[in-house]
Image (tube, rainbow, N blue to C red):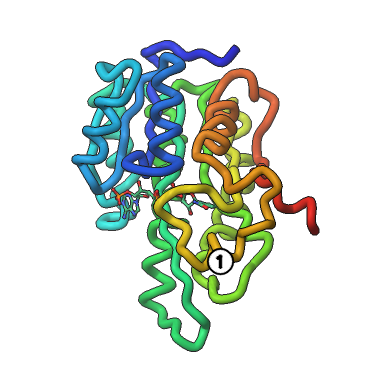
Amino acid sequence: MISFTNDQIFIVTGASSGIGEATALLLNQLGASVVTVARREERLQMLKQKAHHPEHIYVEPKDLTEDIEGLPTYVKRLREKYGKLQGLACCAGAVEILPLRAMDRKTIQRIFDINYFAPIFMTKGFVDKRNNNGKGSSVVCIASIAAVRCPSGMVSYVGSKGALISSMKSIAREVASQGMRINCVSPSLIDTEMPGDIERLYAEGRYPFGIGRVEDVANMIVYLSAVQSQWITGQNYIIDCSSIWG
Ligand SMILES: NC(=O)c1ccc[n+]([C@@H]2O[C@H](COP(=O)([O-])OP(=O)(O)OC[C@H]3O[C@@H](n4cnc5c(N)ncnc54)[C@H](OP(=O)(O)O)[C@@H]3O)[C@@H](O)[C@H]2O)c1
């Protein structure tokens, strides 16, 4: 059975809603301490109220895109404040559906900032050996099945998630000698604030078990953060039931 102790400290970004919130709550339920990061402080405070062990939830409101190059220093400050880190779950993200003809550099940059650069620079801070618990510490990043399926009108989103998967595999090689693990999970349609009406409409009938629940993803993130997955690194797990149709 997966369990943690409260001196095992995880950072969860995007914890104010959806998959990040479910991941933070599950880690905390299983005994870990969780530093929750997102812009909406009131939502992080609500999460703390819902938590099994609220005394081990720490609220850290932040816009992860305001100073991306400063994120490694930000992680260092969190370590100084709360202690050495056991894990990082990068769940913050944003989606944009826009045809190529309507796209400009600014739009692509905005999506890459939160979906690609923020997790990369958070990971850069985390893997610094002064900030983590060494062997057994783990990073999990949420990519997307869209990076594989590449639906039309999602140039920036699929590009950012595809780049994230590739970079994380490369980082996994860099840090393996320190006993650290890095993996991605790539969900298909999950019931959160993110999917729009068009995606939900398109999904009708394609999911034999219905649209995914946030817990379906959180369970995998927690598994990849725990000692039970100690032999797994550099992987990208697709979380989906619709691919059976091809
Ligand atoms: N839902 C799906 O169908 C699906 C499928 C595949 C992949 N994903 C991926 O799963 C991850 C979680 O998405 P979700 O579905 O749970 O959506 P969500 O409920 O909209 O959550 C997105 C989270 O990202 C945070 N965030 C966005 N911009 C931020 C910024 N600049 N700084 C800090 N935090 C920021 C949001 O918090 P604040 O607004 O409070 O900052 C929120 O907590 C994303 O990476 C998404 O791409 C989702």
Residue 178 seen in the figure: no
Give the residue pinned by disc 1. Answer: 159
> Badge 1: how crowded within 10 Å, few (<14), some, or many (20+)?
some
Q: In this view of the protein, which residue sits in the foreground, 87 or 55?
A: 55
**Residue 220 in which image quadrant:** top right
Q: Residue at x 35, y 17 (%)?
A: 52
Residue found 52% across the figure and 34% down from its top:
215
Residue 221 at x, y = what percent?
Answer: 54, 33
Q: Is residue 242 above or below residue 49?
A: below
User: Which residue appears at 27% of the width and 27% of the height?
Assistant: 48
Determine which quarter of the picture holds residue 67: bottom left
**Can you tell which quarter of the image residue 163 is in?**
bottom right
143 shown above or below 140: below
Which quadrant holds the N terminus? top right
Relative placement, left or right, of 61 versus 114 is left
Identity of the amino acid at label 1? Gly
Q: Position of residue 106 (x, y in %)?
A: 36, 76
Residue 172 in view here: yes
Q: Percent position (x, y) of residue 122? A: 40, 44
